[in-house]
Image: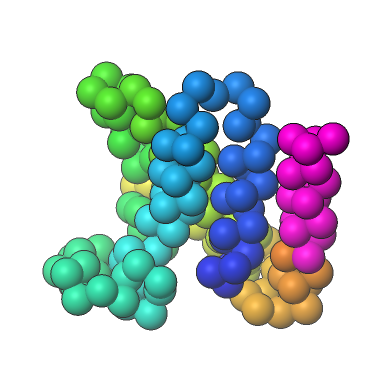
Amino acid sequence: MMFRTHLAIGVLFALLFLPFVTYKWTFIIVLIICTFLPDIDMSQSYLGKHKILRPIQWVVKHRGVFHSFTFAIIVALLFSFYIPVLALPFFLGYSGHLIGDGLTPDGIRPFWPSKDEIKWKIRTNGRVEKILFYVIIFVNILLLLRFFI
C-alpha cells in the first residue's frame, strides 16, 4: 500500500475509536505515527529512509517480523504494562498498516515466525488501491462530520 492509503486507514481507525478514549490528542498522534512503523525495515519508506534505521534494515527482512501481529501484540502488551495510554493507539495504528499490506499480492505473515501468509490482489498504487483510498477518504469525511453535526 502507498503512504497515503496507510495514512487514510490510520485516520479511519482513529476516527472510529476516538469517542471511546480519554487522551484524544495522544491517541491520534500515536496511532498515526504507528501506522507507518512496520515499514521501518524498508529503506524507501517514509520512516525507513532515515539513516539511523539502516542497522535494522541490514538485520530484518522487509515484511518479516515487523509486518506481523506477533510483533504488534508483544509491543502493545509491553505498553499496557508500562505506558497504558499508548497500548491501544499503537495496536490500532500498527494493525491498520498490517491490514492494508495484507490486501496486496506480497501480503504479510501475520503470526511470524509462522510461514502462513495473508495476501490478496490489490496492487500497490494500482487502480483498485486508488479507488479504495478515495472510498476511505469519503468515509473519513463522513466520520469527521459526526463530530460537528
- Towards the viewer: 107 or 141: 141
- Range drawn in magenta: 134-149
Determine if residue 23 is in view.
Answer: yes
Q: Residue at x 59, y 41 (%)?
A: 14
Q: Is residue 144 left or right of residue 149?
A: left
Residue 144's spot in the image, x, y percent? 74, 44
- Towards the viewer: 148 or 141: 148
Answer whether residue 100 is magenta in the image.
Answer: no
Above/below status of 94 relative to 107: above
Residue 48's spot in the image, x, y percent? 32, 70
Q: Residue at x 33, y 64 (%)?
A: 40
Q: Main secondary structure of the magenta part?
A: helix
Q: Is residue 118 left or right of residue 67?
A: right
Q: Residue at x 17, y 69 (%)?
A: 52
Q: Is residue 99 left or right of residue 141?
A: left
Residue 138's spot in the image, x, y percent? 81, 56
- Residue at the extreme front: 148
- Pick the quarter of the image with the C terminus: top right
- Towards the viewer: 63 or 77: 77
Residue 114's spot in the image, x, y percent? 40, 46
Please tell me in which quadrant of the rendered image residue 132 appears. Answer: bottom right
- Pick the quarter of the image with the N terminus: bottom right
Tell me the colour scheme of the image.
rainbow
